[in-house]
Image (cartoon, grey):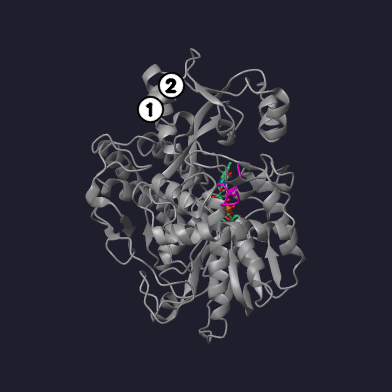
Amino acid sequence: MPASGPYCETPYDVLIIGSGAAGLSLALRLAAHARVLVLAKGPLTEGSTYYAQGGISAVLDRGDSIESHVADTLDAGAGLCNEEVVRYTVEHGPESIHWLLELGVSFTHETLPDGSPGLHLTREGGHSHRRVAHAADRTGWAVETVLAQRALAHPNIQVLEDYIAIDLITTRKLTGEDNRCVGAYVLNRKSGQIEAFRAAHVSLATGGASKVYLYTSNPDSSSGDGIAMAWRAGCRIANMEFMQFHPTCLYHPAAKSFLITEAIRGEGGRLLLPDGSSFMHRFDPRGVLAPRDIVARAIDHEMKRLGADCVYLDISHRPAAFVRSHFPTVYERCLQFGFDLTREPIPVVPAAHYTCGGVLTDRRARTHVDALYAVGEVACTGLHGANRMASNSLLECLVFAKAAADDILARLDRPHPGVPIPPWDESQVTDSDEEVVVSHNWDELRRFMWDYVGIVRTTKRLQRAKRRIDLLLGEIDEYYSHFRVTGDLIELRNLALVANLIIRSALARRESRGLHHTLDHPETDPALDHVDTVLDPSQPMGGFDPLRIAAQPEASPGGEAETDALGHP
Ligand SMILES: Cc1cc2nc3c(=O)[nH]c(=O)nc-3n(C[C@H](O)[C@H](O)[C@H](O)COP(=O)(O)OP(=O)(O)OC[C@H]3O[C@@H](n4cnc5c(N)ncnc54)[C@H](O)[C@@H]3O)c2cc1C
């Protein structure tokens, strides 16, 4: 195994940090021509992908069209999507689904009206057609397990579980010259050793940062590590104020925010107040099928107005056999908590679900740092704008994994900087004698983010959050420089940095748009259409006003002649 020991002197062609839909798709797309190392900070399949229920959007029905999927995505994105990126993604949707079918993903099929077999397509919020391919309500499981099996079986892909990346290694950090990514320092959680991995290309595929909030639908892995590492390496981070809250997670103290798929509403599920009355029609003519931000805000509003702990989701009017066959996972899970989906309304609340912003990339998934890519939820490609439309995120993972692979393969013969990588320096640190600092700060951070930087914001609450995060950042930095790193400390340091980026971005956007809703600026400002919030680590963080740039058309993927919006050749 070339990667064991404190250094890896055998460089890989590509180091991929993350093993969800984005990381494993990228690995499989590359493996015929490149030696790939994939790192997972826990078990290989543990990430948001595994838990995705609803499905993957793509234009697969004859009555549907690329134009319609593009229009729906732009509409949900509230004036902030990059239309070229949206079109590029949507156009590559059908081939992405066919690629998964070829790999062996067992999507749900049905008999079409003409008698031929076809994919069963469901409909979710914001979509004007049925266009979501799914494997019952376990799409993520079906996709992730097949991708993992394929990756494990491929001789060119090496997979290391329980390896948590701490920081990227760049030539700027090593020599002060240029800024090319040449590898990463990684904690081997089993041995406790920090190892250095060298690679000609590195891709972040670390997922999102929803764990920054107290209540989240995400697994523990979503601690924003990739966004934080990219920031420290010199990448720009965009649109972090747009955190998506899923409207319907099961409300039960032991359920750990178990998500109830939007497809239930797509199949006729109704949202009800505690008195049994429906309310969504008062907020949007599309009712329960309005985009997620509208539904989450409406629920938040009604809960606050009534002082209610939750609202209710009811699909008990549909035949029990239909409910059980379409939503087997949700049905079983709810039963475990004493709720029978086929007979009664179930209690639901919103929870942090998806990070629309992230590491700014172009259409080839390149970041601002040479040889560093970002794919999947960690990235901000311009697809989601101010609000992600349901089931567009797995699609983005697949489409941009392919785009990144094409770009990397076209550059494989570039000379690799032979700069020596020093071992991780632990000479100044000791084992911590007060782990309580870490657990306390985890709790404090996630609670004030929920209370002050949640679904509905105000400037005063954001400023309160900013004062707290400034304090915490100082404390965590000091702790980090004195004590040996652990998985929890790495994640806390990253969460705090990401929280800071979210708060600063939210303070800077003085309007309400998409997922960012502030009572101090309740209207959308047309002057800010197509204006992204871009934070640049080379700019001082003292002021509130981040660099804002209008979305620009980009060079086509792989094209080398022009310069794109990131300034890449
Ligand atoms: C409950 C739920 C339901 C969803 N339903 C849908 C849906 O129906 N349709 C849809 O399109 N989207 C859905 N989403 C969103 C979608 O699942 C995610 O956006 C997508 O799976 C992200 O994939 P990813 O590969 O970018 O990251 P993930 O699948 O989250 O994988 C991240 C990987 O990075 C690794 N990692 C993180 N940090 C480090 C580190 N420091 N070092 C090493 N490894 C690291 C993790 O171990 C993991 O392997 C859902 C999300 C959730 C949580």
| The one of 345 and 16 positioned closer to us in this rendering | 345
Cβ atoms at labels 1 and 2 below 8 Å apart: yes
Residue for badge 1 = 283
Asked whether the viewer can see residue 206, the reply is no
**Amino acid type, label 1:** Phe
Whether residue 287 sits left or right of residue 192 in the image: it is left
Magenta stretch mostly in which secondary structure?
Answer: loop
**Which class describes the residues within 10 Å of circle 2: few (<14), some (14-19), or many (20+)?**
some
On-image quarter of the N terminus? bottom right
Q: Can you tell which quarter of the image residue 130 is in?
A: top right
The residue furthest front is: 114
Q: Secondary structure at mark 1?
A: loop
The yes-or-no answer for disc 1 within 8 Å of ligand 1 is no
The span picked out in magenta is 54-63
| The one of 552 and 408 positioned closer to us in this rendering | 552
Inspect the magenta stretch and tell me whether residue 416 lies in it.
no
Asked whether the viewer can see residue 80, the reply is yes
Residue 8: x and y in percent read: 63, 76
**Which class describes the residues within 10 Å of circle 1: few (<14), some (14-19), or many (20+)?**
some
Q: Is residue 380 above or below residue 154?
A: above
Residue for badge 2 = 279
Q: Can you tell which quarter of the image residue 147 is in?
A: bottom right
Q: Is residue 386 above or below residue 171?
A: above
The residue furthest right is: 153
Residue 296: x and y in percent read: 44, 33
Q: Secondary structure at mark 2?
A: loop
- Residue drawn 43% across the image and 72% down it: 369
- Residue drawn 56% across the image and 57% down it: 93
- Residue drawn 51% across the image and 14% down it: 276
**Amino acid type, label 2:** Phe
Distance Cα–Cα, label 1 vs label 2 = 7 Å
Residue 327: x and y in percent read: 67, 33
